[in-house]
Image (cartoon, rainbow, N blue to C red):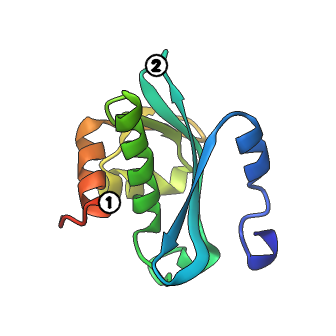
Amino acid sequence: MHKAGWQNDFDWKKVQDNGYEIAELYVDGDTRVQGLIGFKHIKTNLDTYVPLVESAPWNIGSSGQYIGVGGHLFAIACKESWDSGNEGYVVFESKTALVNHYIEKLHAKILSGGARPRMMLDPYAALYLIGKYIFGGEE
């Protein structure tokens, strides 16, 4: 993936070796991975933790080939959270520059501040994302 322009500092092997599941997003008729998300169900917290999410380089930003890759990846994590019994709760850390994007587009909430704010998708945000990206609902 690094040769294709993916983020060099994202070590997906390490994420998988630490017990996280990794989901790949594809588009019908295209064999290229459009994005990746890692997640682990944390039963003691009743949430699903996402340490890493990445869109393919050709999907980054508003001029990307496919819009909504990040939202779709988080919808996958939300559905996996529901399916595991965590009621759609998904927790992740954000780059500061993306906090407002996650609030506006994903309906995420800030749990704590800092250089990498901790954010959460609650069951309402999870249902919104699952409906929009997995079941094809409208905003």
- Disc 2 residue crowd, few under 14, some 14–19, many 20+, Cα 10 Å: few
Q: Which mark is residue 83?
A: none
Considering depth in this image, is 83 or 20 the residue closer to the camera? 83
Query: Residue drawn 32% across and 60% down?
Result: 134
Q: Quadrant of residue 79?
A: top left
Confirm whether residue 128 shows in the render. yes
| SS at badge 2 | loop
Q: Quadrant of the N terminus?
A: bottom right
Q: Position of residue 74 (x, y in %)?
A: 43, 52
* Residue at screen point 31% across, 56% down: 104
Q: Are marks 1 and 2 in contact (CB under 8 Å)?
A: no
The C terminus, quarter of image: bottom left
Calculate the distance from the C-alpha at mark 1 to the C-alpha at mark 2. 25 Å
Circle 1 crowding by C-alpha within 10 Å: few under 14, some 14–19, many from 20: some
Which of the 4 image quadrants contains residue 5?
bottom right
Check residue 134 in the rendering and tell me which mark sits there, or answer none.
1
- Left or right relative to 69: residue 103: left
Task: Give left or right: position of 93 versus 7.
Answer: left
Mark 1 or mark 2, earlier in chain: 2
Q: Is residue 110 visible?
A: no
Q: Amino acid at mark 2?
A: Asn
Position of residue 3 measured from the top left corner of the image (x, y, whole percent): 81, 76
Q: Which residue is mark 2?
A: 45
Looking at this view, is 60 or 95 the one in front? 60
Query: Looking at numbered disc 1 in the image, what kind of residue is underneath it?
Result: Ile
Element type at mark 1: helix
* Identity of the residue drawn at 72% across and 64% down: 7
Q: Considering only vertical position in the picture, is 99 above or below 51?
A: below
Measured as percent of width and height from the top left, residue 12 is found at: 73, 51
